[in-house]
Amino acid sequence: MTSRDDLLKLDNQLCFALVTAARNVVAIYRPVLEPLGLTHPQYLVMLTLWDQSPRSLGELAAELAMEPATLSPLVKRLEAQGRVVRTRRAEDERVLDIGLTEAGRALRAKALDVPGQIMARVGVSEEALVALRDGLAPFAGVRTAVA
């Protein structure tokens, strides 16, 4: 086989490495988030709301690179858990705002341990995770703030 043929080996594909890594990242987060009563997608929603709340469903969807139709059931489950509240804007009832409840705000204190637990499980430093995240930015369109 020539080196040109090597370009089409599965193990040489960035897309395969990213898909496999994404699946494994969710699996690594699962036992850490379980005591908080959160799935990985719900954790991402909460991270966004801890940064700024309330936000419209459309703003959340854009921030999380998700479709509103995909995000809506996640938000409904978080509302059923008492962590968020959904309200229609008085000035435009087409806009659905998502805000934190007191329980949702309180959960943030428990979630502060999540990044450290993930770093310990993976065995990498914060600097290594930041470098990895920043290296993925051209593929993900991610901002470069610390994770």
Image (cartoon, rainbow, N blue to C red):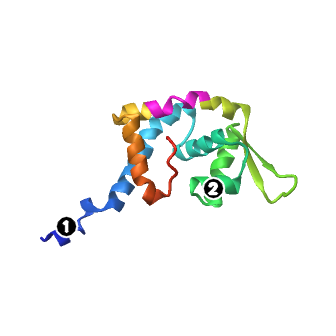
Tell me the quarter of the image containing the N terminus: bottom left
How many C-alpha atoms fall within 10 Å of the one at disc 2: few (<14), some, or many (≥20)? some
Instruction: Using a 10 Å C-alpha cutoff, classify the residue at mark 1 as few (fewer than 14 neighbours), some (14 to 19) or many (20 or more).
Output: few
Residue that protrudes farthest toward the left in the picture:
1
Query: What secondary structure is found at the residue carrying circle 1?
Result: helix
Query: Label 2 amino acid?
Result: Ala
Which residue: 50% across, 28% down?
113
Which secondary structure, mark 2? helix
| Magenta range | 109-116
Q: Is residue 114 magenta?
A: yes
* Residue denoted by label 1: 6
Q: Is 147 above or below relative to 140?
A: above
The answer to whether residue 45 of the structure is visible from this angle is: yes
* Residue at the image point whose x is 30% and y is 62% from the top: 13
The three-letter code of the residue at mark 1 reads Asp
Q: CA distance from mark 1 to mark 2?
A: 38 Å
Answer with mark 1 or mark 2, whichever residue precedes in sequence.
Answer: 1
The x, y position of residue 70, in whole percent, is 61, 57
Residue 11: x percent and y percent? 25, 59
